[in-house]
Image (spheres, rainbow, N blue to C red):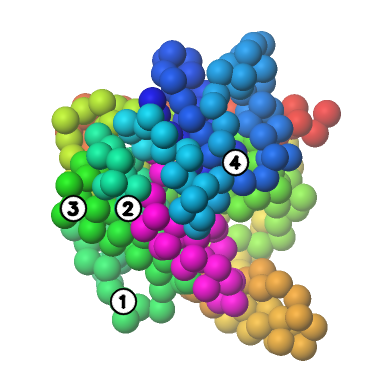
Amino acid sequence: MILVTGGTGLVGSHLLYKLLSSNESVTAIYRRKHKLEAVKHVFSYYSKDANVLFNKINWVEADITNITDLEVAFKNITHVYHCAAFVSFEPDKYHQLRQINIQGTANIVNLCISNAIEKLCYVSSVAAIGHNENSNKLINESTSWNPEDDNSVYAITKYGAEMEVWRGTQEGVNAVIINPGIILGPGFWRGAGSCSLIKKVYSGFNYYTLGVTGYVDVWDVVEIMQLLMKNPIKNQRYILVSDNLSFKTFQEKVAIALGVKPGKKEASTLHLEIGWRLDWLRHKLLGKRRLFVKQVAKTARTSNFYDSSKLINELDYNFNSIDNSIQKVCTYFKTDLE
């Protein structure tokens, strides 16, 4: 029996669909009942029998920060896909991020140890990978993490979560970690990540930036996760990026797919520096949520090129075209608008 945490999220819902399509027996965790509808909606993109597939899941109401809840979810489990995470770059959410991303992962790891789980797959992020001072040098799995960098609170807690997984490997857990770039997939237009970016492009972006980061199709992510779990490979991490694109290029591709106009003005370093400071001031004076923090401003103008050759070589894997991924996701977005 397979356990999936974060089953009501982008990766988790697509992973559930793939596992069920492969006739796997699956238990999945949910925290809020209303989010189960999002899973059914994702299933409906790909199957006319969405409800039939959905009803095959053994759903357990649980919070990864609650050991008692998790003990129930781990009953008869042999393999664990840990997709659950809290995504935020707001500095005031740091303690919540630590509780969910680090302590929650520690709980999962501890239960993997006590239940003699055969294998654990943890969904991390390229945010937990180190960076090179020379932007022309590719970032790979060996690039060192520098705790002295001005890392985002999200990156810090994802790195901390990875440390919990590595601790587990020292205590007998066979594990693999994946570090995907920005994951392109449909269905969660109000959430963080690529869905929110696509929605913002549709609503109209006046500005673009020239920073570069990695992108990957959600179907590549879940396919690779399943391949790694079935493969003898253990205690390894893999970057999952099919293409490195500038934010300008990504925005232009999405705008074309949506039939809208892309931003025409470059947001300069000065614009970005002023922007995050005004956002901080608005937060301090009015108590508004942080929407544009210093680390995000830095990322928007930084070029990070990621290297997935380790995964490509070891699994002989070919990634989906990002152009096709963008086109498909934008088509689902437009369908959901109707």
Quadrant where the image shows the C terminus: top right
Please tell me which of labels 2 and 3 falls first in the chain: 2
The spot of residue 24 in percent (x, y) is 42, 18
The residues tagged by marks 1 and 3 sit, at their Cα atoms, a distance apart of: 25 Å
Which residue does the image show at 61% across and 53% down from the upper left? Answer: 192
Q: What stretch is highlighted in magenta?
A: 81-108
User: In the picture, residue 119 is in which quadrant?
Assistant: top left
97 and 181: which is toward the camera: 97
Task: Please identify, in this view, whether the residue under mark 1 or under mark 3 is nearer the observer.
Answer: 3
For the residues labelled 1 and 2, say whether their Cβ atoms are less than 8 Å apart: no
The spot of residue 303 in percent (x, y) is 39, 62
Residue bearing mark 1: 147
Please tell me which of labels 4 and 2 falls first in the chain: 4
For the residues labelled 3 and 4, say whether their Cβ atoms are less than 8 Å apart: no
Q: Residues within 10 Å of mark 1 (few under 14, many from 20)?
A: few
Above or below, 26 against 279 in this view is above
Which residue does the image show at 68% across and 79% down from the upper left? Answer: 279
